[in-house]
Amino acid sequence: MADPQDPAARGADTAASGAADAHTRQPGLAGRKVAVTGGTTGIGRAIAVLLASEGARVFVCGRDSAHLADALARIREVGDGDGLALDLAERENVARFFSAAEAYLGGLDIAVINAAVPADALMDEDEDDLAYRIAVDFSAYLHSAQAAIGRMGAGSDIVLIGSMSAVSQSPGGSVYVAAKTGIEGFAHALRGEVADRDIKVGLIEPGLTGADFQYPDLPPEEQRALIRRDEMLRAEDIAVATHFMLTQPRRCAVSLMRVESRLRR
């Protein structure tokens, strides 16, 4: 066995790229088959556009057909993609989305599970709204992961987009906190369940990020001002984090990334 402290052994992994021991070999995204839930606006859209620009083929969903058309127009400017307008709160739509993604892509290598809606304090939600928000922000994550893994082979990746709300657990957002704290635990347990199948599971927890998700509390101009002051992230910042997570060697699992603005609002 080669001595890992031997410079020649350290460089063997990357010699083909000419990087010697300066960097580990990073797999590219060209040709990878990617499904993105909530991929028509905000963080999901930014992820879909970046991955498409790197040569991945993407299939996205969102609830609004106009947002879908806008996202697909941008995706097709840089790469290859398609999608559906549907609501993952309806369980049958999860299977519908992943079946359509598999058919369009010819398989599935990566699932970015991101679709979410805002949620408030428990006593500020009526029963129907509470059930809907739990369905989107928690249950649909589990159903989507199950549907994706059932279509994946070795060398695949699940990326769950959670929230720093799981860490801050601020009053006034107890329903969202509950969902995202649950996703944090789910990601940790799921990772061990599928690791032997060479399926990686990563969780990204963004801080405050500019998107229509923040309306009406933070209108566009206020979001732009916060971003200029480094008090809010851009959706593209989370896309870059996702790209990093997906371009590591198979031996390397980046299991959790927390991405916050440098300054706090």
Image: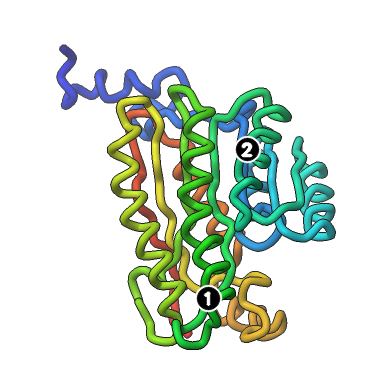
In this rendering, the answer to whether 58 lies above or below 50 is: above
Pick the residue in front: 75 or 38. 38
Residue 253, given in percent of the width and then of the height, sits at 34, 39
Q: Quadrant of residue 249?
A: top left
Q: Residue furthest top?
A: 1
Q: Residue furthest front?
A: 127
Residue type (three-letter) at the residue carrying disc 2: Phe
In this rendering, the answer to whether 113 lies above or below 95 is: below
Q: Quadrant of residue 10?
A: top left
Pick the residue in front: 239 or 132. 132
Check disc 2 and report its element: helix, strand or loop. Answer: helix
Tag 1 residue: 119
The answer to whether residue 253 is left or right of residue 240 is: left
Residue 42, given in percent of the width and then of the height, sits at 65, 63
Count every numbered label the image shows and give the total: 2
Neighbours of disc 2 within 10 Å: few (<14), some (14-19), many (20+): many
Q: Is residue 44 in view? A: no
Check disc 1 and report its element: helix, strand or loop. Answer: loop
Tag 2 residue: 98
In this rendering, the answer to whether 101 lies above or below 233 is: above
**Image point 69% across, 46% down: which residue?**
60
Q: Is residue 144 in view? A: yes
Pick the residue in front: 18 or 170. 170
Q: Earlier in the sequence, mark 2 or mark 1?
A: 2
Pick the residue in front: 166 or 142. 142
Identify the image quadrant of the N terminus: top left
Identify the colour scheme used: rainbow
Q: CA distance from mark 2 to mark 1?
A: 25 Å
Residue 137, given in percent of the width and then of the height, sits at 51, 62
**Image point 47% across, 39% down: which residue?**
146
Residue type (three-letter) at the residue carrying disc 1: Ala
Neighbours of disc 1 within 10 Å: few (<14), some (14-19), many (20+): many
